[in-house]
Image: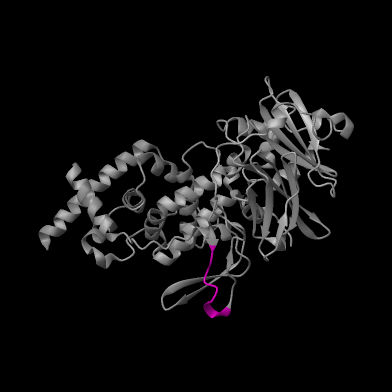
Amino acid sequence: MAFGEVSANLRALPGVSSARFHVCRGVACQIKDSRRRSLSTVVDHRARQIEGVYRSRYLKFRNALATVTGDWETARDVVQEAFAEALRKRDTFRDEGSLEAWVWRIAMRLAIASRSTQSPVQLTEIGEPGLVDSRLDPDLAGALRQLPPRRRLIVFLHYFGDLGYGEIAEVCGVSEGTVAATLSQARHDLMIALETRGASA
Amino acid sequence: MNATGDSLLQDRFRQLADTVDDSDWNDVVSRAAGLGRQRWSLNGRRVAVLAGIAFALGVGATVVSGAPLLGLGAASTTPGPVAVERQLPNGTIGWLFRHEPRGQSLAAAQIAVGSLVGSHWQPVRFARVLTPDPALNTRIVVSLIGKRGRNVCMTVIDRDSGGGGCAVGLLLRPFSVMTSGRMEHGRTLITLAGLASDDVASIKLFLGHGAARRVPLKDNAFYVRLSRPDLPANLVAYDDQGRVIGTDQSVNLAAGSLTGP
């Protein structure tokens, strides 16, 4: 039995990629790190984690992504595709950050791609995120429009996506300090804009 | 910016959030499995119709996706029982840890110890070669590795290829399954191999087209083949009184990464 063929045969084993097999020189390396759980637990663990994120955070994803896609239907489609991609590529997640932030990055890329004609899509090309229906709160919609798009996105990720500073930093590829400063400035600007609009109404 | 201002913003955003939960995990699994989908908007409501067979992952998962609409698509449920009737703690394989000489030795089976999964990681303390299904050439080597021989590895040797995995300790609940696939005569051949705990008296494989197969189980090792049209599949373990003690549908998701008919 040649181990080249072993790795080929392992291709379909969820959670254990052939690349990892070679790197670790055996599946055991990976499973040793998994705190004494059984093989089947390890194999399914990542898929179940992703399912857990989906079940607990679906609405947060859809509502935040709708500000990028521009409508609920596309946002829903993006969430479904993002989690499907996360499931397919779960072997590539390296535990170097939060699993949820990793799925958010996939989702954000797909959301931007849904409005972009350019390929490949860059996370920096966020377009003009905004409220799906600005008629529900015209003052807030107007105040948000005054923010730069990137600052607006961070606001949406925080308030609709319920993401913390660290996760937003991972999703947007900036430091936590930048997120904190951006959010603080955005809140300040929003409150001033809302107060001004309230006073003039 | 004070906390009052922040909570005011939180309230305003909360009122704008759409709270209608239209999540559908089975749809995610189907997409992950690479199944085609077509969508229509019917009276403003999105209708998703599966163009192929639907896969389900996880105990109790059921896939029903808009099948009756427009006369297209197919509905599919996980075949066989999915509810576990008897919950068991982690199981083990008694004979293995007692070093009982079941099956064959490596020497008798002409298998080099260096070819076993895990042998390059820790020293092999005990290994036996099992043949769950005498009708097939496939052998499963179950080995104990490590300083005290407490870590369990499984190596599946199927003609000219093989694969496997190891677990630190052995925590079978109630079985571990390895799914693999390959192309043979233009068809995708999927194999399920694994180890079952002493609590498992029999295993059945329920297939999408309604058939059910008894899975050859001998000396706690099992091995069964199926083809892509058999999916979705559900592997069900029973105790000695016929109660369901475990189910596994991970083959349906794993099959999504395979190519071919």
Q: Is residue B115 above or below residue B31?
A: above
Q: Point out residue B94 in the picture as x, y percentages from the top left corner.
A: 68, 31
- Is residue B65 a member of the stretch shown in magenta? yes
- Is residue B222 a member of the stretch shown in magenta? no
A180 left or right of B5 in image: right
The residue positioned 69% from the left and 48% from the top of the image is: B202
Q: Quadrant of the C terminus of chain B?
A: bottom right
Q: Quadrant of residue B45?
A: bottom left
Query: Can residue A105 be seen here?
Result: no
Query: Can residue B137 be seen here?
Result: yes
Q: Point out residue A74 in the picture as x, y percentages from the top left corner.
A: 45, 65
Residue placed furthest toward the top: B147
B227 left or right of A195 in image: right
The residue positioned 74% from the left and 30% from the top of the image is: B143
* Magenta-tinted stretch: B63-71
| Camera-side residue of A167 and A90 | A90
B25 left or right of B79 in image: left
Q: Is residue B106 above or below residue B28?
A: above
Q: How many marks?
A: 0
| Camera-side residue of A57 and B110 | B110
Rendering colour mode: one colour
Q: Point out residue B220 in the picture as x, y percentages from the top left corner.
A: 71, 40
Q: Point out residue B163 in the picture as x, y percentages from the top left corner.
A: 75, 40
Q: Quadrant of the N terminus of chain B?
A: top left
B62 left or right of B207 in image: left
Q: Is residue B55 above or below residue B50?
A: above
